Amino acid sequence: MAASILVVEDEPAIQELVSFTCTSNGFEVQRAESVAAAQQAIRERLPDLVILDWMLPDRAGIELLRELRGGERTKSLPVILLTARSAESDKVAGLDAGADDYVVKPFSPRELVSRVRAVFRRRAPEKSGEALAYGPLAVDPARHEISVDGKPVKMGLAEFKLLKFLIGHPERVFTRAQLLDSVWGDHVFIEERTVDVHVLRLRKALAAAGAQHLVQTVRGLGYRLSTRAEQ
Ligand code: CA
């Protein structure tokens, strides 16, 4: 359930520090020490965020960043650039290439974690590890608890993950394919109608607290979480 972070860094001491900082804050970490190793790791499994060093032994991290932004599967993957370069022109180049943030070495572990959380909050709130609320709903990922008007509601793991994702993006309509990718992960081959089954179960679980109307079907498109009247 923890969000996964790919740490791409060739200096062992910094790789260790970044990895330790992330794991001790509840994130799951994969490591790579070159652009090639990072590409391989991303091909196998799409992480939720990448912490990317600029100076890597085979190629520049910023080239990998541009590649990620150009790929259909990776274009919206959050990336934080990590680098010793602090010149303003480098920061601008990094952000122009599509970095979500830019951390200059030496950095404090606490600062790095707060930047990771800030990027998640902006791009994928359900992965920040923080409690989320919308309307009468609240999700506490740490306690693995969902409540409606403060009263806990029980549901299965798949329904929990689905609602956690939706509450991070309220009012937005997601297709079944988008939900499969975001909630079940890419490279997972599940039929789209499986989403319908879990939406039904989620509504059933929420119905116990009278909140089933929040999970809405948008005909011809998909599903959304909304407090507005159903369309
Ligand atoms: Ca380096």
Image (cartoon, grey):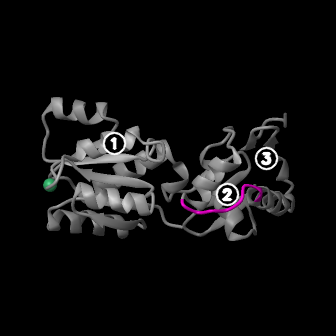
Q: Position of residue 35 (x, y in %)?
A: 25, 54
**Residue 225 lies in the magenta-colored region:** no
Q: Going 74% across and 57% down the picture, which residue do you hit?
A: 195
Instruction: Tell me residue 148's x, y (percent).
Output: 75, 57
Q: Which mark is residue 218?
A: none
Residue shown at 29% from the left, 69% from the top: 20
Please identify the quadrant where the N terminus is shown: bottom right
Residue 173 figure quarter: top right
Residue 49: x, y in percent?
40, 53
Q: Is residue 226 left or right of residue 180?
A: right
Which marked residue is nearer to the observer: mark 3 or mark 1? 1
Residue displayed at 72% across by 60% down: 147
Does dot 1 land on a helix, a strand or a loop? helix
Q: Which residue is mark 1?
A: 67
Q: Which residue is mark 3?
A: 214
Residue type at numbered disc 2: Leu
Residue 119 lies left or right of residue 175; in this view the side is: left
Horizontal relation, residue 207 to residue 170: left or right = right
Q: Tell me the tag on residue 162.
A: 2
Mark 2 near ligand 1 (CB under 8 Å)?
no
Q: CA distance from mark 3 to mark 2?
A: 13 Å
SS of the residue at dot 3?
A: helix
In space, the residues marked 3 and 1 are separated at their CA atoms by 38 Å
- The magenta region covers 187-193
Residue 37 in which image quadrant? bottom left
